[in-house]
Structure formats: structure tokens, C-alpha cells
Image (cartoon, rainbow, N blue to C red):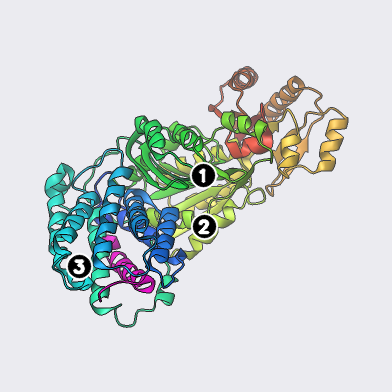
């Protein structure tokens, strides 16, 4: 084979994907750098799968490469996945007008891809995938003149690539201590080894690209081999889309926020990856350079604790509409899945990249009213697969199913998991602070050592004992968000009412009260709470607010004087709740004994 056309380069890459897929669990197992989160194999497989499944294959190698590079950038996951995407982007950049790739052109393409891969990373580190890419580019340049064919060129350079891979364990102390090579580098070697096999012999017998492309990916995470507690908490990723993206300017504003920074892509699309404690600030910086899509924020510290410092045999999952302080979430190792908040075509992750303060600021300027959406099924599937690898079972408690599709999406993902682990998904029939109190009770039962079935059997009872009263300044947000009918809104406005909103036993919205002012509204909520406490003593209660801490603290003080004990916590509502409650919304959540 003297050259590669569009179909052949695609099939070579596909053969590489098959090798990576077969090695996925091993790559996860040896993943200790830059963070021992055990997902390098999963991320590379997912990146390559998205690149090849979305690619438009033509006879032109340049056109096919451009399509693969675009798909890789859009679907890149994790540090190594983004470097793979940048490698493809650099390769395509050099070969975009080539119909059939000959040896010399291919070597120039790989050299350009190497440069682009190094440029994408803020602080390039040898002993990683970069070292293997560099070694391959050097070997290709040495052999290109004498190699009689494309296959011979690949074959002659593989020993240098494998030597570079083995040398990574000497270049990075963390790899040497763990007795492993770099997982990303190993994945790259598997990829080009698969491509080399195709160039020599074609695809393995019985392989059907059409059938294989539809094969369901495994998103498991194997036991992590060694590793240290992450320095920064969140692995933050996003795509920014614009007309003239200044990648160097992006790198300069993001670099002070953390480490493992990668800015890959081109002038119109850039993929961002950074480990940081400030994902919201990172997204604000990214958003200044274009439209932000495909946001992703993983809690690496919690992932590390699941593997190395797990407290309980049962994992507890909820969603971001659960208003519970981060200290309690951390104490009980609760996994919180963020809902999406959408301003036009820009996406934010509730509580991670947007809070009510930013939400209300954006809402004031937005031409179209923002919306929210539940997490994708795939996100829940990946989470449940990961948790099932480390816990005996999983319990998920979600926002009222009548108010959000999150419960249904989570339940669907749990049903499709094939590893036999028990996953129970429960509709709390409520939201915000009362959901927080229910989730807290579930966490306490798990911590007390109760069995999975015992805990699940109690959740409906917890929901029956929970109550929520929300006082709003305006019904405009509830009406525009579809939670209150326009007719109810017209009547409330005509009578100058400031109603109290609650949730009924089925999880639907209901309106209470006839207060004519915010002060009367709050006084009524205090009286309602006191009456319930007199009838059935409260176990605890909480105050949550729409970006008005001073008013919330005042409500908390009034409740403490009335009830004789303080709230369990005062917390800001989620941005999804703010979308419906509006600025200054105030809620009292109760949990009866």
C-alpha cells in the first residue's frame, strides 16, 4: 500500500479504535497521571468512537480527515481524549487538500500534529502521550526516505514508539512508583498499532464497520492502581464556538485557575480542559470568547474518595435541584448530578458553572427566557456504571417527576445497566430544600448501617413528612417557566397577591395564601410552620433563598424565635429553582419527626 485514500484512512483509524476498545479496562487500571480517576481508557474510546461514528467518509483522504478531526473535537473526553482530538486536528490541517496520502505527506502531517498537541497544553509534560507522539514523529522522519511502502514505514517505526512508551515509567515519578506506563501514551500506541495492522492485513476477519459502529460502549471504570488525592477538585471541560477564537488569550486567562490545562482546536472551535477549584470562573472566562456548549464538570475529589476512601456500601445520588449545603454533601459522599440551564445556545451546569446571582444577571439581559433540561441518559449511565464498580448498590432520590424529567431519565439509565447491581431510583415528589431534607435523611440511614431495601422502604415516608413553602416576589418567572398558568397569574396580579407556592402529594405545584406584601407573605409562612410544629413536632427545617442572604437570615431568626430552635441550614436555591422562583424567592422546608 503506497498511499491511503479517504476510505482507507478511515478504516485504519477504525482498526485503531478496535485495539483501544479491547485495551480499555487495562488503560483504566493503569491510569494514575495526571489524576488517578481510572477513566483514560473510557475517555479515549469514547473520543474515538464519537469521531468515527460522526465522520463523513469520502474518497478524499483530506476531506475524511477533516470530518474525523471535527468529530473528535466535538466528542473529546478527558485529558487524553482532547490530546487525541488535537492530534487529528493537526494531521488534518496539514493534509486537508490531499486526496491520497503518500509517505512524505503523512510524515509532515504527523509532525504538524505533534506541534499542535504540544501547543495545546499549557505545561507540556514528558512521560505522557506527548512523548510517544514525539517519538513516532522522529522515527517516521528517519525512516520515510528508505521505507518502500506505507506499511513498511509503520512497521519500522513501531519499535521506537514502544520504547518511548516503556520509557514513560522512568520519566514520571508517579508512574515509576505505581509500576506502570502512562495510560494515555499506551492508548496512543494501541491506536497506531491497530492502524498498522490494517495497512498490512486489512480489518480483522468478521469485522463489520457498520455493525461495530453501533456497538454499545462500556463506560466502566476499573479499580485505580495507586494515585494521589487530586490537588484541584473539578475536571472541567467545554467547547467554545466562535468566529475568531484566540486560543492563546484563552490559555492566558485560564492558566492561573488550575493545572492540566489544554486548549485544543482551531479559530472556530476550541476544546477546553482544566483541573480547577473554580469551574464557574473558568466558564465565565471561556464564555467571553464565544458560545459555550457541551459543558462537563467532574468532581475528581469525590471520584478519588469513592475508590480510596469510600465510607458506605451504598451510593447515594441526587440532582442539583436538591438544595443541601456542600458540607453535608461532602460529609455523606452524595453524588449530585447537575441539570442544564440554557440561555439561547449557551449551556451552564446548575451549581457548578452558574449560581442564582449570575442567573438573574443573565436573565435580565436575555432576549429569550432561559430554560432548563434534565441530564442526558448517557451521563446517568456512566455514573451508575462507575458507582456499580465500587459500591454494593445505588439509591437515587430525585426532584418531583411531575416537575422535571430527571427522575425518568435516571430510572431509564438504571434499567439499562447490565452488571446486575441493585439500583433504586425514587421520585421524591418535591424539590429544593425539602428534597434536601429527604436526601439528608436517606444519607443518615445509610450511614447508620441500614440495608438497601430498608432505606428504600422508608423514602416514601420521608417524602410524606416533608413540606415546602415558597414565597415569591413575582409570578412572572413561574408563568414563563410553565409552573403556573397565565390565568392564575392574571388573577394574582389583579389582586396584588404575593402567593405562597407549595408542592402537593403528587409532586405538582399548588398556590396558597392571599398575602398582599412580601412581609405578610413571610409572616404567613412563619405561622404555617409554627402550626405544623405544634401539631407534629419538626425533626428539622431549612431556609433557602433566591440570592438574598440577608432576608433569609432574617426569616431564619424569626423562625428560631417562634419554634425555639434554629434551622438546620440556610442555603441558596439552585439556578433551576431560581428560574421558576425568581429573584428574592424565599422558601421554608420542613421535615416532621
* Residue 36 visible in the picture: no
> On screen, 197 above or below 29?
below
What residue did someone put label 1 on?
Answer: 243
> On screen, 486 above or below 583?
below
Q: Nearer the viewer, residue 228 or 122?
A: 122
- Quadrant in the picture for the C terminus: top right
- On residue 377, the disc is 2
Tag in front: 1 or 3: 1
Q: Position of residue 78 (x, y in %)?
A: 36, 49
Q: Nearer the viewer, residue 426 or 415?
A: 415
Residue range of the region highlighted in magenta in the rendering: 1-27
- On residue 154, the disc is 3
Q: Residue at x 53, y 27 (%)?
A: 569
152 is within the stretch colored magenta:
no
Query: Which structural element holds mark 2?
Result: helix
Q: Give the class, few, some or many, for how many residues have Cα within 10 Å of label 2's Cα (few <14, many ≥20).
A: some
Give left or right: position of 593 versus 209. Answer: right
- Quadrant in the picture for the N terminus: bottom left
Amino acid at each position: 500500500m503506497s498511499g491511503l485514500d479517504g476510505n482507507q484512512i478511515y478504516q485504519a483509524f477504525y482498526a485503531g479504535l478496535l485495539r483501544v476498545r479491547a485495551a480499555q479496562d487495562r488503560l483504566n487500571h493503569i491510569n494514575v497521571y495526571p489524576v488517578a480517576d481510572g477513566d483514560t481508557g473510557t475517555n479515549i474510546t469514547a473520543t474515538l468512537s464519537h469521531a468515527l461514528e460522526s465522520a463523513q467518509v469520502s474518497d478524499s483522504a483530506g476531506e475524511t480527515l477533516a470530518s474525523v478531526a471535527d468529530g473528535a473535537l466535538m466528542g473529546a473526553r478527558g485529558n487524553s481524549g482532547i490530546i487525541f482530538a488535537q492530534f487529528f486536528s493537526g494531521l488534518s490541517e496539514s493534509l486537508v487538500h490531499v486526496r491520497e496520502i503518500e509517505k512524505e505527506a503523512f510524515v509532515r502531517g504527523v509532525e504538524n500534529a505533534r506541534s499542535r498537541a504540544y501547543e495545546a497544553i499549557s505545561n507540556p509534560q514528558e512521560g505522557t502521550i506527548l512523548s510517544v507522539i514525539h517519538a513516532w514523529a522522529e522515527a517516521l522522519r528517519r525512516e520515510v526516505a528508505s521505507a518502500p511502502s506505507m506499511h513498511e514505514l509503520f512497521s519500522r517505526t513501531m519499535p521506537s514508539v514502544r520504547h518511548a512508551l516503556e520509557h514513560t515509567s522512568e520519566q514520571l515519578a508517579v508512574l515509576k512508583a505505581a509500576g506502570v506506563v502512562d495510560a494515555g501514551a499506551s492508548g496512543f500506541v494501541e491506536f497506531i498499532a491497530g492502524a498498522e495492522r490494517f495497512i498490512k492485513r486489512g480489518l480483522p476477519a468478521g469485522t463489520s464497520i457498520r455493525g461495530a459502529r453501533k456497538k454499545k460502549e462500556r463506560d466502566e471504570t476499573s479499580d485505580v492502581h495507586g494515585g494521589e488525592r487530586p490537588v484541584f477538585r473539578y475536571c472541567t471541560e467545554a467547547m467554545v464556538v466562535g468566529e475568531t477564537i484566540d486560543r492563546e488569550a484563552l490559555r492566558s486567562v485560564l492558566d492561573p485557575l488550575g493545572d492540566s490545562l489544554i486548549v485544543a482546536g482551531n479559530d472556530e472551535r476550541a476544546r477546553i480542559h482544566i483541573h480547577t477549584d473554580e469551574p464557574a470562573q473558568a466558564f465565565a472566562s471561556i464564555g467571553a470568547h464565544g458560545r459555550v456548549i457541551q459543558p462537563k464538570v467532574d468532581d475528581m475529589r469525590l471520584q478519588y474518595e469513592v475508590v480510596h476512601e469510600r465510607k458506605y456500601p451504598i451510593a447515594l445520588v441526587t440532582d442539583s435541584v436538591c438544595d443541601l449545603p456542600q458540607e453535608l454533601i461532602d460529609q455523606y459522599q452524595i453524588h449530585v448530578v447537575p441539570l442544564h440551564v440554557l440561555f439561547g445556545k449557551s449551556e451552564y451546569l446548575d451549581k457548578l458553572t452558574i449560581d442564582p446571582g449570575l442567573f438573574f444577571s443573565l436573565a435580565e439581559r436575555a432576549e429569550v427566557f432561559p430554560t432548563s433540561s434534565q441530564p442526558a441518559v448517557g451521563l446517568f449511565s456512566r455514573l451508575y456504571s462507575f458507582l456499580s464498580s465500587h459500591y454494593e448498590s445505588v439509591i437515587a432520590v430525585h426532584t418531583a417527576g411531575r416537575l422535571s424529567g430527571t427522575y425518568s431519565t435516571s430510572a431509564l439509565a438504571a434499567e439499562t445497566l447490565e452488571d446486575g447491581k441493585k439500583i433504586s431510583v425514587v421520585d421524591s415528589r418535591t424539590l429544593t430544600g425539602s428534597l434536601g431534607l429527604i436526601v439528608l435523611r436517606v444519607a443518615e440511614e445509610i450511614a447508620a448501617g441500614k440495608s438497601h431495601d430498608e432505606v428504600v422502604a422508608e423514602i416514601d415516608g420521608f417524602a410524606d413528612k416533608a413540606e415546602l413553602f415558597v414565597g415569591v416576589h413575582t409570578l412572572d418567572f413561574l408563568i414563563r417557566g410553565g409552573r403556573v398558568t397565565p390565568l392564575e397569574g392574571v388573577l394574582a396580579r389583579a389582586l396584588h397577591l404575593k402567593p405562597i407556592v407549595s408542592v402537593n402529594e403528587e409532586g405538582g405545584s399548588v398556590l396558597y395564601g392571599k398575602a398582599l406584601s412580601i412581609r405578610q407573605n413571610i409572616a404567613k409562612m412563619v405561622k404555617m410552620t409554627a402550626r405544623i410544629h405544634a401539631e407534629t413536632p419538626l425533626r428539622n427545617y431549612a431556609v433557602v433563598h433566591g440570592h438574598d442572604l440577608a432576608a433569609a437570615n432574617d426569616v431564619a431568626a424569626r423562625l428560631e424565635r417562634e419554634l425555639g430552635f434554629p434551622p438546620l441550614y440556610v442555603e441558596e436555591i439552585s439556578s433551576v429553582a431560581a428560574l421558576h422562583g425568581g429573584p428574592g424567592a424565599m422558601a421554608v422546608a420542613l421535615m416532621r419527626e
